[in-house]
């Protein structure tokens, strides 16, 4: 195709009026992507703390069954979480119910819970 024909072919196309639209779309979409990424990271943190809190409750129940000492069970839950946690121990005839409340760092706009709870039940021997 010669240069003359190419110019003639280009002249038939409609004028391009969307210059800069990619920048505008990027400016609109970027804050949404950042907000969603922050929320996903915050929810991931809540899930991780929740799993650790359940592990702390299980470890405290195991410690209480083995030693029979409530303070050792509370210390074990704090050691597993590596934080100050609230431990509630309820004991019936053969069962021990442990409830560990663990703090969570607040997420963006306080959409995540401030604390999560892990529970465990063990049978006394």
Image (cartoon, rainbow, N blue to C red):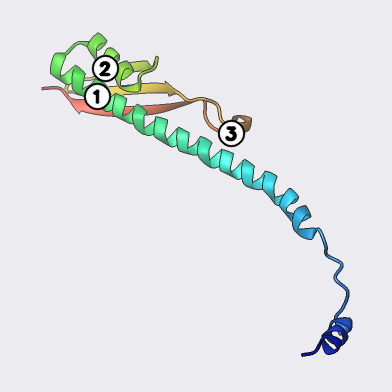
* Residue pictured at 74% horizontal, 49% vertical: 27
| Residue under pointer 1 | 59
From the viewer's perspective, tell me whether residue 40 is left or right of residue 97: right
- Compute the Cα span from label 1 to label 3: 29 Å
Residue 70 seen: yes
Secondary structure of the residue carrying tag 3 is loop
Image height check: is 84 above or below 39?
above
- Local crowd at mark 3 within 10 Å, few (<14), some, or many (≥20)? few
User: Relative to 21, does residue 61 appear above or below in the rendering?
Assistant: above
Q: Do labels 2 and 1 touch, CB within 8 Å? A: yes
**Which image quarter holds the C terminus?**
top left
Residue 9: give its label. Answer: none
Q: Identify the image quadrant of residue 116.
A: top left
- Callout 2: few (<14), some (14-19), or many (20+) C-alpha neighbours within 10 Å? many
- Rounded to the nearest angstrom, the CA distance separating label 2 from label 1 is 7 Å
Q: CB under 8 Å between callouts 1 and 3?
A: no
Residue 72 % position (x, y): 23, 11
Q: Nearer the viewer, residue 65 or 25?
A: 25
Asked whether, in this view, residue 51 is left or right of residue 123, the answer is right
Question: Is tag 1's residue or tag 3's residue first in the polypeptide sequence?
Answer: 1
Write down the residue under mark 3: 111
């Amino acid at each position: 195709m010669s240069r003359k024909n190419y110019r003639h072919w280009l002249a038939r196309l409609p004028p391009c009026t969307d210059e800069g639209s990619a920048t505008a779309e990027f400016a609109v979409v970027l804050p949404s992507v950042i907000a969603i990424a922050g929320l996903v990271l915050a929810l991931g943190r809540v899930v991780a703390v929740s799993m650790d809190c359940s592990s702390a409750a299980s470890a405290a129940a195991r410690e209480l069954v083995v030693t029979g000492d409530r303070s050792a069970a509370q210390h074990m839950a704090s050691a597993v979480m590596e934080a100050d946690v609230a431990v509630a121990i309820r004991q019936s005839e053969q069962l021990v119910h442990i409830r560990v409340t663990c703090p969570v760092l607040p997420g963006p706009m306080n959409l995540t819970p401030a604390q999560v709870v892990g529970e465990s039940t063990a049978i006394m021997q």
